Amino acid sequence: MSERSERTSGHTSAVEHRYEVRSREERYRGRIFDVVTEEVTMPGGGTARRDLVRHVGAVAVVALDDAGQVVLIRQYRHPVGRHLWELPAGLMDVSGEELPAAALRELAEEADLTAGRIDALVDLHSSPGFTNELVRVYLARDLGDVPAAERHERRDEEADLQIVRMALDEAVDMVLAGEITNASAVAGLLAAARARDTGFTQLRRADAPLPR
């Protein structure tokens, strides 16, 4: 038995209730997400109604250069009414596009960068209390510049997007100080620091399966 199996075996032996969906009502359908209400069976009998957001999913990228700096962007987010520090990131909204390709596309579009190496870093359910959104965060290295003539034209909120590089440890300090609150940025930066400190030995391949 592997070390990981030994850690988790004691937590999965109990019989878990199987939550079955008895009915589903769609309340809103959009390009990025749908809102539905489902009636779900509960332990001990009976059912309960749960409102949830079904999301297309997303990717984010911790771009780490040879000097140990990471690329952060500062972007306005209207739901919270302010600018946030984030990673280059975007939606899985291109039909047939694989996760690694989406990550490289977003890195080019939002940070004007290419990457010679990309690995799966961490996966997260952004807010599982109400949405099934799953974000795959990648670690990109061997960075290069997108030629000026080929750079993406940024519009709307992206028009005032700021791009900065800072030491990974400085970015981690910002996370711990509450200055970086975007979920994928928090998870990605902490995971990148851990990966660096362990010699990048625990990274998964770029096309590793998503958690089920």
Image (tube, rainbow, N blue to C red):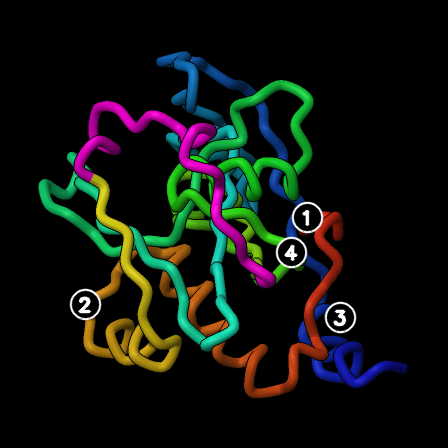
State yes or no: discs 3 and 1 in contact (Cβ < 8 Å): no
Report which residue position mark 3 lands on.
Answer: 13
Give neighbour class at mark 2: few <14, some 14-19, many 20+ (Cα, 10 Å): some
- Residue 179: which numbered mark, if any? 2
The mark closer to the camera, 1 or 4, is 4
State yes or no: discs 2 and 3 in contact (Cβ < 8 Å): no
Residue at horizontal 63 percent and vertical 34 percent from the top: 20
The kind of residue tagged 1 is Leu
Find the distance from the CA under tag 1 to the CA under tag 4. 16 Å
The kind of residue tagged 2 is Glu
Residue 143 in which image quadrant: bottom right
On screen, residue 100 versus residue 9, left or right, reads left
The mark that comes first in sequence, 4 or 2, is 4
Quadrant of the snapshot with the N terminus: bottom right
- Residue 147: in magenta span: yes
Q: Nearer the viewer, residue 87 or 176?
A: 87
Q: Disc 4 on helix, strand or loop?
A: strand
The mark closer to the camera, 2 or 1, is 2
Find the distance from the CA under tag 3 to the CA under tag 4. 36 Å
Q: In this picture, which residue range is highlighted in magenta?
A: 141-160
Find the distance from the CA under tag 4 to the CA under tag 2. 27 Å
Report which residue position mark 1 lands on.
Answer: 210
- Residue 118: which numbered mark, if any? 4
The mark closer to the camera, 3 or 1, is 1
Q: Disc 3 on helix, strand or loop?
A: loop
